Amino acid sequence: MVLRRCRRLLVDDEDAVEAMQETFVRVLEHDARLDARAPSSLLWTMATRVALNRIRARGSRPTPGADHSLVDRIATAPLEDQLFARRVLAAVFREHDDTTRAIAVMHHVDGMTHQQVADVVGLSVSGVRWKLRQLRATLQEGDDE
């Protein structure tokens, strides 16, 4: 499950395996503080956060082997669309906390419902909606500039 999640977000198999290993290292490092009542949700959320941090860290470097991925579509889009898409991605991955980024990916990329996302991240449905509204507000502020 963890490897599948990392592969879905990172596309590159080698990077996904490293992210999976990093996820399990973090579980071992923080096992005393983790709430293990829902281990699948915990691993899913941790893997998502590790993968998102890797995406943010690599910045605009291309992803090898990304066949028809979102990154690929952005890279091959007309210049004005690329600039807009990069602004959107920058807003998502820089200006918001890990939870908001994870919520955005689960809802918009994975197609999960608000309830499914809430169950995974441990928030209420209204909390998930609030985080998504914050994200939209940030994106709209960027369009106004």
Image (cartoon, grey):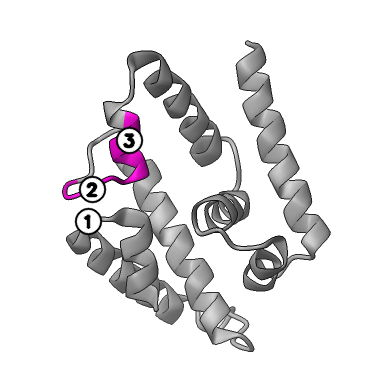
Please name the residue shown 44% across and 78% down the image.
27
In the orientation shown, which residue stands out farthest toward the bottom?
37
Q: In terms of image quadrants, where is residue 41?
A: bottom right
Instruction: Identify which amino acid the numbered label 3 is placed on.
Output: Arg
Residue 107 is covered by the magenta coloring: no
Please name the residue shown 73% across and 56% down the image.
128
In the orientation shown, which residue stands out farthest toward the right?
126
Q: Give the percent coordinates (x, y) of residue 136.
A: 68, 35
Residue 67 is covered by the magenta coloring: yes
The residue pinned by badge 2 equals 66
The reply to whether dot 1 and dot 2 touch (C-beta < 8 Å) is yes
* Bounds of the magenta segment: 64-74
Instruction: Identify which amino acid the numbered label 2 is placed on.
Output: Ala
48 or 9, nearer to the observer: 9
Sequence order check, earlier mark of 1 and 2? 1
Please name the residue shown 41% across and 60% down the image.
50
Mark 2: secondary structure:
loop
Mark 3 vs mark 1, CA separation in Å? 16 Å
The residue pinned by badge 1 equals 12
How many labels were placed on the picture?
Answer: 3
| Rendered image: mark on residue 73 | 3
